[in-house]
Image (cartoon, rainbow, N blue to C red):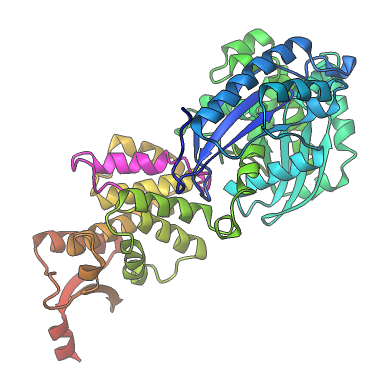
Amino acid sequence: MPYAPPASLPRRGVVDLGSNSVRLVVYEGDSRNPMPIFNEKAVPRLGLGLQSSGRLNEEGVSRALLVMRRYYLIAKAMGADPFEVLATAAVRDASNGADFVARLQDRMPGVPIRIISGQVEAEHSADGLLCGIPDADGILADIGGGSMEVVRLIRGVRDVSQSLSLGVIRLADRSGNNLEVAQKKVEADLATVPWLKDGAGRSLYVVGGAWRALARIQMARDAYPLLMVHNYRLTAAAARDLTNLVAAAPLRVLERMEGAPKRRLEDLPYAAIALRRLLRVTGANQVVFSASGLREGWFMRHMPDSIRDQDPLLAACQEMARRFGRDPSMPEALFDWTSPLFPRETAEERRLRLAACWVSDIGSHDHPEYRAEQAFQAVLWQSGVGFDHPTRAYLGLTVALRYEVVADAPFLSPARHLLDGAAIARAETLGKALRLAYTLSAGTPDLLGGTNLRIQKGRLILRLEEDHGVFAGDAVTRRLTRLGEALGLEVATETAVQRRAAE
């Protein structure tokens, strides 16, 4: 019998039916950070040979019909509603696309099957990217098997877009599997989009499995500490080196490259050529890889404005606090309590401090010997799309220090790799402040309200109210001293009576 999800956790399913692959994703809940609970991909290569034949590949059609029937039964059994199919370049361009959709509809009764235009595909891709990187500014390129969508982004707003016949399968077909010809095709097509040059000095955001495969190769080459492509960044110079390497590598060399997916080896040189020419045309100063695209854009269109308008980082941290913390009113109290320690922080540092306060109690239910490590990993490996890699490291390090981890613990190595000295110092100060706050308050705003911190005349002063259940015991004194050392300040405690007498 199909599962009936609770009203508080609705499920939505979407199939991205592309020229190369077909993927089903089922999301759970109404969230600023789409939460996939099922994700499966098959590679029928519907668009293979489309350039010359004008028709969907017959073998690919047979495989796709089989896979899509499975996806229909999965979505039905999981209680996904709505459940839709988005068919892209191959189906919309093929002469037998409509016939294929009719056959597909027989196997998926009642399921909307939408053949979307290149314009709509670009809009969905941009919405998906902005779901995870809401302030994106530059050029977005989404490569598939049959097409590449390019979009100009202006400080988090989707602008003009265009769809080009530069998917990896179609590019190979158009060039007769000749890489030199493929490069000329890419150059000619990109030259028809004059606004691509507006990416000069800005970011090039890239979406699509073929480009994510390139990112994994580079991550393996660099022994990168996170196995997460989303928000992985390369300088333009590093990206050019990578694309030059992959575009020139024979198949036998690609096969031996660590991180190279076996099913995409034939596509990689074409993906590399497309990316290399985009870098030249746009003049972008960095490449930002995104795992959010068309499917996440579809998901966000089902969310109300009240969710779409949320900060994805803070929304994810708040969700973690609600699931794993003890008191949902504590993070805001901590934010106010720690504010005197950071009088000159930037707006972004302030935002990160608020995020850290939200996740600061997520280890409260874990074994005390493992809280620091488990909390660090929970933040570092969080699935929310609103986290870039340094932010994951900063928040993870802060929460581990809140649990009084030793600074040279081996599991902290990703943080040390991803953060500069200034960020590490801020994390250490905030982590020690949070440790002191929880020691004083037992994780409750009521007890924390009987204390405050201030910096005065080169000293860090902890004030304690009488009869609030707080006092300067050994643990408090020790943790206050450590916080003072992080700030380079002498420390002192005072009671309200002492403060009034001094005044």
Does residue 399 lie above or below 460 as drawn?
A: above
Q: Quadrant of residue 473?
A: bottom left
Coordinates of residue 35 in the picture (x, y in percent): 50, 41
Q: How many marks?
A: 0
Coordinates of residue 266 in the picture (x, y in percent): 70, 14
17 left or right, relative to 176: left
Q: Quadrant of residue 485?
A: bottom left
398 or 296, nearer to the observer: 296
Q: Specify the farthest residue to the top.
A: 252
Q: Main secondary structure of the magenta part?
A: loop
Q: At 41% from the left edge and 49% from the top edge, which residue is drawn?
A: 394
74 or 455, nearer to the observer: 74
Q: Is residue 391 magenta?
A: no
Coordinates of residue 244 in the picture (x, y in percent): 70, 24
The boundaries of the magenta stretch are: 362-388
Q: Is residue 275 in sight in this rendering?
A: yes
37 left or right, relative to 244: left
Q: Specify the farthest residue to the front.
A: 1
176 left or right, relative to 168: right
359 left or right, relative to 306: left
284 or 299, nearer to the observer: 299
Q: At 66% from the left edge and 33% from the top edge, which residue is drawn?
A: 239
Coordinates of residue 47 in the picture (x, y in percent): 78, 19
Q: Is residue 373 magenta?
A: yes
Q: At 50% from the left edge and 44% from the top edge, which residue is drawn?
A: 10
Does residue 142 lie above or below 336 as drawn?
A: above
Q: Is residue 283 in sight in this rendering?
A: no
